[in-house]
Image (cartoon, coloured by chain):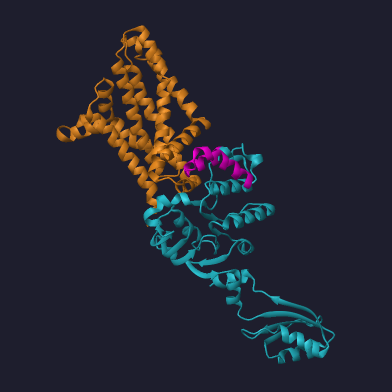
Chain colours: A cyan, B orange
Amino acid sequence: MNIRIENLSKRYGPQKAVDDISFQVKTGEIVGFLGPNGAGKSTTMKMITGYIGIGQGDIFIDDQSVKQNGDDLKKFIGYLPENNPLYLDMPVMDYLAFCAALQGVEKTRINERVREMIRITGLNAEKHKKIGELSKGYRQRVGLAQAMIHDPKILILDEPTTGLDPNQIVEIRKLIRELGKEKTVILSTHILPEVEATCDRILIINKGKIVANGTAENLRNQAAGQEILRVRIEDAAADAVLHELRRLSATDRVEWVDKSLNRFEIISRTGASAKREVFQLCVQKGWVLSELIPMETRLEDIFRNLTMN
Amino acid sequence: MQAIWVITKRELNSFFDSLIAYIVLVLFLGFSGFFTWLFGSDVFLVGQANLQSFFSIAYWSLFFFIPALTMRLLAEENKTGTIELLLTKAVTDRQVVVGKFLSTLLLVAIALLFTLPYVITLANIGKIDVGAIACGYLGLLLMSAAYISIGLYASSITNNQIVAFLAALFIGLFFHIIFDALASNFTGWVGELFNTLSMSDHFDSISRGVVDTRDLIFFFSIITVGLLLSELSLTKRNLD
């Protein structure tokens, strides 16, 4: 199912939590929602799930308005809220069966679904314990299990991997990737590598507005503009190398990184690449090119650039 | 309908899992048994084969116990945030409210069911008026339903269970005695109005064996208003 958000706004008192945002998510797409605390990620997710009312604008799920048919659309959505609230006095299996029944899973299939979820999330050893007795990581797995129990077409996950150990994080990411092939997934996170590992597209939101929307690669290109190479050229005098590099037609600037090791940073002109010229220069002069590293702008830098004002 | 039952079942289980149900059952049966059979104006003192003494005890004990049952229904969910999970499931706010209401009503009905031995005992002592006793139980159930819906509303407006308990008692107190007391202090239509609002007036008339439509309208109005207000305070999160 496709999600289309049109000019969505929401205010809490005088403060605008979400300010006129629009975007689309298609079936089979995993979108990562990034943003500093209080940027409006959770508010947007709560509006999609129908927990809080829509201020201005509207959300369409397969052309059905959440504003008008919110209650009918709930059954297509699996939601893991922030902080993962759960009934601590219920045993894991009972809780999952309760969620399945509420989501309208047929009676005969409830047991099968519960077992399936317990297997996927690795809760087998804990399935008879009360949720209150579980550690944070296991509770998070219960939260994920209840979100997916009715095999929803849309998954809204608010910080799904908090509290999980590294092995579990890898597993959950893999699971989300697999599910994402046929479902529509929106997840929010603070962990930037996670977005790159799991998401097809990144939305960065700041102060209620969308400040970036695209694949990780797209964002890098937009942010970087100029190619940056880090090279090490041996068997040559550093000053001579610097002089020659600066004369290349594709280079904009060349800077020292480490004079004693003959390391340089080459910033190419916009739209040009200096890689070939550097290689040919070395061949021509008989220098040894022992390192050539294209420097990517890190996602962290993009994030900081867009959200720090 | 199915969703309501799923919620009712969970709430009822949760009453029994958390011991609340057992404590309330023991206290209710202890109180009412003691005063019906052993102490004060008990059955033997009155010397009539009716349960009037039980009904007047239950009239008070239920008044105090019901807020203790209803206080956690929504206040706890508001506090722990589980309300968000519940309301984003494929259920409407109304189904949640009605499900929780029914669970408490069922618990009270179970408590009343445990007093059936009283009726059997009484039937062995003397000739009982089955109709009057059935009406007495109906009155207790209707009164309980009214206080449950008030308690549910009190629980929906706060995330603190103590506040929910006290608010439910406070609102309940008006119907339980204050309107009755006011009614006797006023004459004319004002007195008549307070009399109509008084719980004891309607409860007495039903437990005497007279099921009047006015009494039924009274009870069902309180139930409906309480449930609608509870639903409204859940829905309020949607407003800007």
Using the rendered image of the protein, determine whether residue B162 is visible from the camera's viewpoint: no
Q: Which residues are magenta?
A: A94-120
Q: Considering depth in this image, is B102 or B199 the residue closer to the camera?
A: B102
The question of residue B198 being in magenta is answered with no
Task: Find residue B221 and report its horizontal and vertical position in percent.
Answer: 28, 36
Against A29, is B71 above or below?
above
Task: Find residue B139 and report its horizontal and vertical position in percent.
Answer: 31, 25
Residue at the left extreme, as displayed: B188
Task: Find residue A212 and report its horizontal and vertical position in percent.
Answer: 53, 70
Q: In this rendering, would A248 be left or right of A200?
A: right
Q: Residue at x 25, y 29 (%)?
A: B215
Q: Residue at x 40, y 56 (%)?
A: A66
The question of residue A117 being in magenta is answered with yes
Task: Find residue A284 and report its horizontal and vertical position in percent.
Answer: 80, 90
Residue at the top extreme, as displayed: B125
Tell me where residue A187 sits by quadrant: bottom right
Against A78, is A201 above or below?
below
Using the rendered image of the protein, determine whether residue A268 is visible from the camera's viewpoint: yes
Q: Considering depth in this image, is A2 or B65 the residue closer to the camera?
A: A2
Q: In this rendering, would B58 be left or right of A1?
A: left
